[in-house]
Amino acid sequence: MLETGIKAPDFALPDQNGEIRKLSDYAGKKVVLYFYPKDMTSGCTKQACNFAELYPQFTEKGAEIIGISKDSVASHKKFEEKYGLPFTLLSDTEKTVLQAYDVWKEKNNYGKITMGVVRTTYLIDENGMIEKAFGKVKATDNPSQMLNEL
């Protein structure tokens, strides 16, 4: 996990509509940047739907929400449409941003060692600096936790 007080690594990734988005596009706004393992899975769906439910409150506070996983643009589009997600989902199939943000890690699932995304959320300030970092977050609690941080 990256430390607070450092410049958040910029990136250029396609969103659920295939448009390239950069972190620098959000200069002047707070960004809740959350990394999650996989579209349509139980925990990730709960997390995304809870962010969607609270989205108006995030925008009231001048914050944008961005979710990133290694899923494809097409998978993100289906996820967005199925659950009516009002925020940006970015596709990092090459895992470059996942690695830059230090969330692509070895995981132990019932004794089996695999590589995967450790659910992590960063609060990035208006100047692109990491204000807060939360590792191994609980999917259902993370959205309200982040709203409270704002």
Image (cartoon, rainbow, N blue to C red):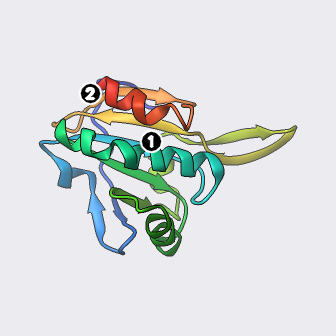
Name of the residue lying farthest toward the right = 111
What residue lies at 45% left-to-right and 41% top-to-bottom? Answer: 101
- Residue 49 pos. (x, y %): 47, 49
Above or below for 1 versus 85: above
Above or below for 76 versus 51: below
Give the label on residue 120, or none.
Answer: none
Identify the image quadrant of residue 112.
top right
Above or below for 117 versus 92: above
Q: How many marks?
A: 2
Q: In this rendered view, identify the residue nearer to me: 147 or 15.
A: 147
Q: Three-letter amino acid code at disc 1? A: Tyr
Identify the image quadrant of residue 29.
top left
Q: Is 26 on the left or on the right of 15, as rendered?
A: left
Identify residue for label 2. Answer: 150
Quick one: label 2, few (<14), some, or many (20+) residues within 10 Å? few
Q: Three-letter amino acid code at disc 2? A: Leu
Q: Is 108 on the left or on the right of 89, as rendered?
A: right
Q: CA distance from mark 2 to mark 1?
A: 21 Å
SS for dot 2 = loop
Can you see residue 62?
A: no
SS for dot 1 = loop
Identify residue for label 1. Answer: 101
Quick one: label 1, few (<14), some, or many (20+) residues within 10 Å? some
What residue lies at 61% left-to-right and 45% top-to-bottom? Answer: 43
Could you tell which of marks 2 and 1 lies nearer the N-terminus? 1
Tell me the quadrant of the picture where the C terminus can be found: top left
